[in-house]
Image (spheres, rainbow, N blue to C red):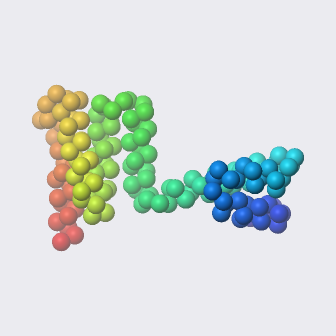
């Protein structure tokens, strides 16, 4: 890492292998009063932890789930944008041949659309969650 001393890389390498709950004590012992270096290592650890969790699932799925999370927080569960995000997650899962999960989410989309619009015919686009999965599956066969 450019501009790094050997010590900070060494401490980072050791601390990244520790369980998160043990890192504080390790960093206390390693740096004592050197707060700047400690903050630097903590930032590297946070970036590493974030990257690791992000890469555990395919990027398109991670982005779709993040969009869903944001929309739920902004609008609450019963909102057309939340239904749209759920639909996107369902389509992505279908594209990954994860049909059971995709189907469960597709049915959530239909239930949510029925609640939001009070009748399903008002949202023909949301019905595509199931038909899109069928098209994806047919393309693979």
Image coordinates of residue 138 in percent, x first then y, are 17, 66
Position in image of residue 32 (x %, y %): 85, 49
Residue at 20%, 37% in the rendered image: 111
Q: Is residue 20 left or right of residue 99?
A: right
Among all residues in the image, which is located at the extreme top? Answer: 118
The one of 99 and 71 positioned closer to us in this rendering: 99
Which quadrant would the N terminus be assigned to in this image? bottom right
Q: Nearer the viewer, residue 25 or 108?
A: 25
Percent x, y for residue 78? 29, 30
Tell me: residue 74, above or below residue 8. above
Residue name at image x 71 percent, y 59 percent: 15
Above or below — where is 13 with respect to 38?
below
Q: Residue at x 47, y 60 (%)?
A: 56
Q: Position of residue 136 (x, y in %)?
A: 22, 62
Instruction: Identify the residue at image location x=50%, y=56%.
Output: 54
Q: How many numbered marks appear?
A: 0
Visible residue check, residue 126? no
Toward the right, the furthest residue is 33
| Residue 10 visible in image | yes
């Amino acid at each position: 890492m450019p501009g790094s001393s050997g010590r900070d890389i060494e401490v980072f390498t050791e601390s990244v292998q520790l369980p998160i709950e043990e890192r504080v004590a390790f960093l206390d012992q390693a740096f004592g009063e050197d707060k700047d270096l400690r903050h630097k290592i903590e930032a590297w650890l946070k970036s590493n932890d974030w990257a690791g969790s992000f890469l555990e699932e395919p990027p398109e799925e991670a982005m779709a789930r993040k969009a869903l999370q944001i929309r739920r927080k902004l609008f609450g569960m019963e909102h057309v944008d939340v239904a749209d995000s759920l639909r996107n997650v369902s389509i992505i899962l279908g594209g990954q041949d994860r049909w059971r999960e995709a189907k469960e989410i597709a049915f959530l989309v239909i239930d949510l659309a029925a609640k939001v619009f009070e009748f399903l015919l008002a949202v023909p686009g949301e019905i595509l969650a199931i038909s899109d999965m069928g098209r994806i599956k047919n393309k693979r066969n």
